Image: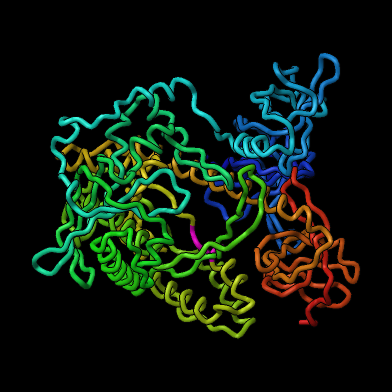
Amino acid sequence: MSKRKYSSNRKNHKKKKIVPEYEGKAIMSRDGFIFVRVEGQEEDIYVKASKTRGALNGDIVRVAVTQEKTGQAKRRSGEVVAIVERSGRPFVGILHIVGDQAWVLMSSKTMPYDISVPVPEGGVKGMKVAAVVDGWERGAAGPFGHVVDVLGMPGENDTEMHAILAEFGLPYRFEKEVENAADSIPETITDEDRAHRRDFRDTLTFTIDPTDAKDFDDALSFRKLENGNFEVGVHIADVTWYVRPDTAVDKEAQARGTSVYLVDRTVPMLPEKLSNKLCSLRPNEEKLCFSAVFELTPQAKVINPWFGRTNIISDYRFDYEGAQAIIEGAKPEEVPADIQEAILILNKLALKLRDRRFKAGAVNFERPEMKVDVDENGKPVGVHQKVSKEANWLIEEFMLLANRNVAEFVATAGKMGGKASAKAKTFVYRIHDEPNMEKLNGLRDFAGHFGYKMGPMEGGKEIAKSLNSLMKAADNKPELGAIQILALRSMAKACYSTDNIGHYGLAFNFYTHFTSPIRRYPDMMVHRLLARYLKGGDSANKDYYTLQCKHASEREVIAAEAERESIKYKLVEFMQDKVGQEYDGHVSGVTEWGIYVEIEPTKIEGMIPYRTIKSDFFIYDEEHYRAVGRRSHRSIRLGDPLRIRVKGTSLEQKLLDYELVENLPEKQ
C-alpha cells in the first residue's frame, strides 16, 4: 500500500476549500467507526461510522480529511470517498440458517456487521465459519458474501486456532498439489548432490534447539587449529537445493513468507517432508547445508570467512537446557568429552562477540516473553516467563555472526571490513532504522518522573548507550515494565529491503537473514542470491526483489499478529476460572476508554474501563501517559501499581475485564 495524497474541491459554506485526500488501510472498530492508516504518517485518520461508505476492516480506501488536528480537535478526522480495494481477508463468525437464507453472525472486535451468505455445503447452524465479503447493496443493513471455510463447532481447540488463522488469511493446510510435489523430492543424497561441496562429515558438529523442536535448520561445527585459533562452521539446511524456483513448493513458500507459530502448533512454510525430514539437521544423518565458516581467534576476532555449500553429519542433538547444564559445570556421561569442550569454548567466544556488540552500540533490552503451557488437548495449564541463558546466547551470537558476514560479503563486493561498494549487487537485507526522536523525548520526560536522567541522544550509538543505562538503572524496579513499553514504542520496525541502511538495534552496518530458510522465505532468497554471486553471476533484478521484500515484511507482520491473537485467546481461556480473584498488577497502557493492567507474575493483561471506576470521572492525558480524575485530580499513570479483580472474560473477543479494588495513587 503506497501513500497517495489527492486534493479535491468541496463546497463549504459556498466557499471552495482544498480538502486533502489520502489512500490508506481501514482499521475498523466494533462500533463501526474506522481509522485509516496511511503509510509514512504517524497518526491515523478517524472516520465515524456514518462516513465509511461501507468500508470494512483491511480495505484500502481513499479518505478526505475534513478536520485537521488542532488545539480543540485531538485528532484528524475525515470521510471515505472511495473504496479502492476490498481486503479479501475472511471474517469469522457463527452460521445462522433460516430456511434457505443464511447469515454469518459477527462478534469480532473489527467487524460490526453480519454478513448475508448462501447456505454453505456442509454448514450446520451454530458452526463457526469463515466468510468473505463480496459487496454491499445500497440500502442494505449489512454486506453480502460467501462462506469459504466451515471451521467447526465453537469452543473446540482446533476450531478456534483455525479461526485465528482464517481471520488473518493464513492457510492451515497445504493443497494436494504442493504436498505431492514435496513428496516427489528424492530423499537419497547422491554423489551429484555431494559434488562441489566442502565435506564436514568428519568434523565435530551438533545442534542446540528447544526441547520440542522438530525442524533443526542450523548446526555448529568446531575444530581447533594448529595456530591456536578455532574453526567454527555455521551450517544451515540447504533448502534451496531441494526447492527450486517457480515450483509448486516454492510458490507456496513465497506466498506464505514465513512459518506461523501459534500457542499449540506450528503452521509451517514448507511441507513436513522438507521441514521435519529432508532439511532437518537430525543427528547421525548426512545432510546438505549452505554454510558460513569462520576462523576465530581466542578473542573472537574473525579471520578468513568462507561461504559455500557443504555436507555434514550432526554428532549430537542438544536442547537448550542440556547445553546450559554443561556451561554451568555439568559433565553428563552420555555427551562425549570433545563435544563438552566445544560447548565451553564456543560459549566463551559467544560471550566475547556479545560483549563487543553491545559496546558497539547494540540495544540491550526487551520485554519479558511469556509462554503459555498447554496440555495434549490444547488446554492452557500454566503461564511462565521464557528466560534466555548462555546456551541461547551461544546460538544467537553465531547466527548473528553468519547473517552479518553474509550481508557484508555481498554489500562490500567481497572486500570484508570495508564500506559498501558501488559495485554491490542486488541483495535482501534485514534493516532497522533509528528510533523516533519525538517518542524518545517522551520517554525521557516519563523516566524523569521516576528520577531517571537520560544521557545525550544526538547519535545512534549515544541513544543506545542512554537506553541501555536507563534499563540497567530501572532493573527490578516497579516502573521497569512501563519504561520498556515506551522504549519499544520509540523503536522502528525491522523489515526486509534491497536498500541497506544497516540494523540499528544490533549495531550492524550490514545484516541479512541467512540462518532460517526452513521457516523464512527471505532466507531462501538470500541463499539463492549468495549462491549466484559466489559463482560470479551478475546482479539480480532489483525491482523483483524489492517487491519480494515488501511482501515478506507484510507476511511477517501478519504472522506475528496471528501469534499474538492465539496467545490472547489462551490467556483468556486460562483466566476463565479465575473470575472474582484479586491480583496485584501494573498499568501497562492508558487509552481514551480505559486502563490496561498487567497482573503479576503472569503479565496477563486486561482492561479497566473508566466507566467502571465509580469514585471519579477520568480524562485521558495522552501527552503524559496518564488518566486524571476530574473531581479528585488524582492520576493513574503508566507503570503505576494497582490492585485488580478479574470481572469477566470474553473468549470470542479475546478480552479480559478487570475492575479496580484498591485505592487510587495519591494526587500528583
Please identify the quadrant where the C terminus is shown: bottom right
Judging depth in this view, the residue of 374 and 627 nearest the camera is: 374
Q: Residue at x 79, y 44 (%)?
A: 31
Using the rendered image of the protein, determine whether residue 61 is visible from the camera's viewpoint.
no
How far from the left and from the top, in percent, is residue 495? 43, 50
| Residue pictured at 39% horizontal, 24% vertical | 248
- Across and down, in percent, residue 470 comes to 51, 78
Side of 505 where 3 appears, left or right: right
Give the extent of the magenta segment: 488-492
76 versus 459 height, above or below = above
Locate residue 379 relative to residue 399 in the image: left or right. Answer: right
Q: Is residue 555 above or below residue 98?
A: below
Q: Which quadrant of the view contains residue 82?
A: top right
In the displayed structure, does residue 321 sit left or right of residue 119?
left
Coloration mode: rainbow
In percent of width and height, residue 276 lies at 40, 38
Front residue of 213 and 134: 213
> Which residue is the extreme one toward the right?
614
Please state if 624 lies on the left or on the right of 618 as rendered. left
Front-lying residue, 529 or 331: 331
Question: In the image as oriented, which residue stretches furthest toward the left?
Answer: 226
- Residue 380 in the magenta stretch? The answer is no
Residue 481 can be seen, yes or no = yes
**Residue at the spot 9% in from the left edge and 68% down from the top edge:** 227
**The magenta stretch spans residue 489:** yes
Residue at the image position 25 percent from the left and 56 percent from the top: 405
Secondary structure mainly formed by the magenta segment: helix
Instruction: Work out whether residue 53 or residue 597 is closer to the camera in this orientation and state it.
Output: 597
Q: Quadrant of residue 250?
A: top left
